[in-house]
Amino acid sequence: MTEMKKTKGYSDILRELEEMLEKMNRGDIPIDDLEDTIKSAAGKIRYLKDRLRATEAEITKVLKDIEGDSEGDAEDR
């Protein structure tokens, strides 16, 4: 799965997860494959959550930097 993270983006992995869930809901996954499918889905969910957290942290950092720049500009006036 590590290689998947490097080559596929968030949208691609989300699409794969949605397809897996659709197959599960339709009953298209053989019982013998269900455990591996669930583990794979859980890994995808973990990856997607981590990406969201990292993106949120980066956005927060950028916004704080912008706010800091704005405060500095106001003090210069």
Image: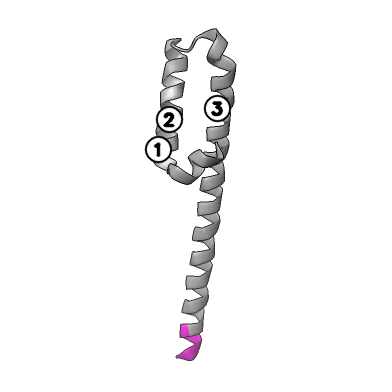
Pointers 1 and 2 in contact (C-beta within 8 Å):
yes
Q: Is residue 13 above or below residue 6?
A: above
- Quadrant of the image for the N terminus? top right
* Residue span colored magenta: 73-77
Q: Position of residue 3 (x, y in %)?
A: 52, 41
Tell me, for residue 40, which label it has, or none. Answer: 3
The residue that mark 2 highlights is 16
Residue depicted at x 54% and y 14%: 33
Q: Amino acid at mark 3?
A: Ser
Disc 2/disc 3 C-alpha distance (Å): 10 Å
Q: Is residue 36 above or below residue 73?
A: above
Crowding near the residue tagged with mark 2, few <14, some 14–19, many ≥20 C-alpha atoms within 10 Å: some
Q: Secondary structure at mark 1?
A: helix
Disc 1/disc 2 C-alpha distance (Å): 6 Å
Pointers 3 and 1 in contact (C-beta within 8 Å):
no
Residue depicted at x 42% and y 12%: 26
- Residue 20 counted in the magenta span: no
Crowding near the residue tagged with mark 1, few <14, some 14–19, many ≥20 C-alpha atoms within 10 Å: few
The residue that mark 1 highlights is 12
Q: Secondary structure at mark 2?
A: helix
